[in-house]
Image (spheres, helix red, strand yellow):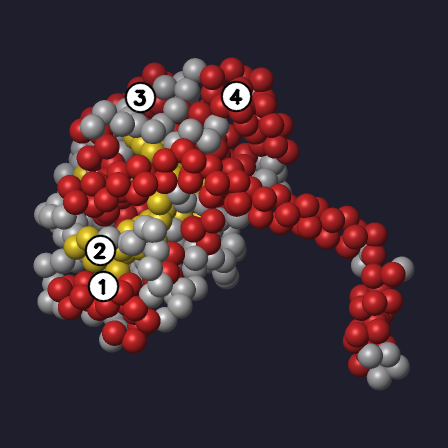
Amino acid sequence: MSKKGKIRVLIAKPGLDGHDRGAKVIARALRDSGMEVIYTGLRQSPEDIVEAAIQEDVHFIGLSILSGAHTHIFPRVIELLKEREASDIKIIAGGIIPDEEIPKWKEIGIEAIFGPGSSTNDIINYVKGS
Amino acid sequence: MNEKEIIERLKKKDVRAVARLLTFIENEDELAENILKKIWKHTGNSHIIGITGPPGAGKSSIVDLLTKISIEKGLKVGVLAVDPTSPFSGGAVLGDRLRMTSAQDPGIFIRSVASRGHLGGLAATTRLMINAIEMLENDITIVETVGAGQGDVEIVQIADTTIVVEVPGLGDEVQAQKAGILEIGDILVVNKGDRPGSDRLSKELAMMLSLGEEKEWMPPIVTTTAINGDGFDKLWEEINNHKQYLGTEKRNAMRLKRINYELENQVSQKLFTKKMIQIGNSEIPNMAKEILNRRIDPLTAVEKIIRE
């Protein structure tokens, strides 16, 4: 990346629950750390998210899910990225993801999962570090 | 993706290659220059529509509705939506995509752009980004500016058709007489037409136009309501009227003027950089001390530095 390059992150809120406070807090924290954050809003389908991530040429997709829909959405987003030859875009997730499932999701391609109580600094450092 | 791969993929109208090229352009990466030099002759074929107006006037919603109409008509659209970069952190939240519900249609390409410190309503690289998107062979390119103040008129240097969006409730009729953003509209839109005061605003704008000089193209005033789609057939019609009015001849004359201006800018920018490197880092601070101590005046100092 050239010296003027910025980290670009897409923050998406897939599924049907409308609790987007967490997504907004993360978007704001990443902005304040100097990143460009594309916020796509509520009720995004995996197809919407992947298409947006490609057009926006982001480094990361951040998925915020609290409803349990991640069991469907994680694999679908990963699959679509593969189909579009865009698996270099990394996925991070937050929200309510049961602890015992985390190893499984990491294995199929979710880079990191930040549950309730995660500090925004940890997330920023993670994104900047990878 | 390396240079060769991107160019290959651009020829196939590959979305990912366009997206990557846009990133290189934004980052002012050398790769972008190399690629743009090679694709230049394939660009310049879309009708460029600029949309500007104050923050929250409904620009993104209007873009969304215009892209929907375009899809219906079988036209392909590229969108560049500019939002401001924080002057403190250098970061940005780009939220224009939020309103653009047809983003997933294969005929639509949307890119959110941070202004990265550039003033005037656009990013420094917006013009080149339009050229990159045109590799998708889109019929229309829509450029949405940062929520604009009265003086953010740079869009007029880029767009073939400039749409200025106003909303009721922002000021009295004297606001409509002021110079600046209202002067650049080829089409004036009064959005939020369901709100009280929209009729009055529309009349004030008409009054403003009637007081000005007679022009070949008199900007139409269109009242729209983005939440229910009212007025958008009319807006679409006026965009086409303006496009027809321009034709190829007027459009090219306008573009030629801008290219001249742009070239002049680029040349002076390059010359400036070259000269500054020549002058070096020490000359200016040294001279500043001399000026402070009244050993030399600023005017002579400038001449002396340039001559050296």
Residue behind mark 4: B6
Q: Residue at x 30, y 28 (%)?
A: B76
Mark pair 2, 4: CA separation: 43 Å
Do the residues marked 1 and 3 share a common chain? no
- Distance from Cα at disc 4 to Cα at disc 3: 21 Å
Q: Position of residue B291 (x, y in %)?
A: 82, 78
Please state the horizontal and vertical placement of residue B38, each as a whole percent of the image.
59, 23
Q: Which image quadrant is residue B111 in? A: top left
**Where is mark 2, residue-wise?**
B221
Residue B194 versus residue B106: which sits nearer the camera? Answer: B194
The residue where tag 3 is placed is: A80
Question: Which percent across, then down, holds residue B17?
Answer: 46, 24
- Report the Cα–Cα distance between label 3 and label 2: 44 Å
Does residue A38 appear in this view?
A: no
Q: Which residue matches tag 1?
A: B206
Residue at mark 1: chain:
B
Q: Are marks 4 and 3 in contact (CB under 8 Å)?
A: no
Q: Kindly identify the residue that appears in the image at 43 percent across and 60 percent down.
A: B152
**Alpha carbons under labels 4 and 1: distance apart:** 49 Å
Q: Nearer the viewer, mark 2 or mark 4?
A: 2
User: Which structural element holds mark 4?
Assistant: helix
B146 with respect to B117 (left or right): left
